[in-house]
Amino acid sequence: MSKLFPTNEHPVERGLRVLLGLGLLSLVAVGPQSLWGLVGLVPLLTGLVGSCPLYTALGFSTCPVNTKTA
């Protein structure tokens, strides 16, 4: 499963994605009450999981690399 959803987001980025997702989802209940707020599910879920499918497809990662010395 870790090959399908590798952790490729920095912890700060994950937090920002969760906040952005919650902010967009709030548009469904508060404010203009538009269903476009459901777009907030994407950053919310990727922030909670810690893996962005687009990053995986492009081979990109903002997650800090752990270097092990032998």
Image (cartoon, rainbow, N blue to C red):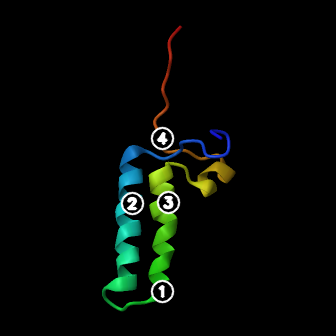
Q: Relative to 43, is 52 on the left or the right?
A: right
Note whether 61 is above or below 68 in the view shown.
below
What is the three-letter code of the residue carrying label 3? Answer: Leu
Note whether 44 is above or below 70 in the view shown.
below
Element type at mark 2 = helix
Q: Are marks 1 and 4 in contact (CB under 8 Å)?
A: no
- Precedes in sequence: disc 3 or disc 1: 1
At a point 68% along the width and 52% down the height, the residue shown is: 57
What is the three-letter code of the residue carrying label 1? Answer: Leu
**Residue located beneath label 1 in the image:** 35
At a point 67% along the width and 40% down the height, the residue shown is: 3
Q: Nearer the viewer, residue 32 or 68?
A: 32
Q: Position of residue 22 (x, y in %)?
A: 37, 68
Q: Position of residue 19 (x, y in %)?
A: 34, 63
Element type at mark 1 = helix
C-alpha gap between disc 1 and disc 4:
32 Å
C-alpha gap between disc 1 and disc 2:
18 Å
Q: Relative to 29, is 48 on the left or the right?
A: right
What is the three-letter code of the residue carrying label 2? Answer: Val
Q: Nearer the viewer, residue 50 or 13?
A: 50
**Residue located beneath label 2 in the image:** 18
Q: Position of residue 20 (x, y in %)?
A: 38, 67
At a point 36% along the width and 54% down the height, the residue shown is: 15
Note whether 16 is above or below 33 in the view shown.
above
Element type at mark 3 = helix
- Precedes in sequence: disc 2 or disc 3: 2
Number of the label disc, if any, that sits on residue 70: none
Q: Relative to 14, is 42 on the left or the right?
A: right
At a point 46% along the width and 72% down the height, the residue shown is: 40
**Residue located beneath label 3 in the image:** 45
**Residue located beneath label 4 in the image:** 63
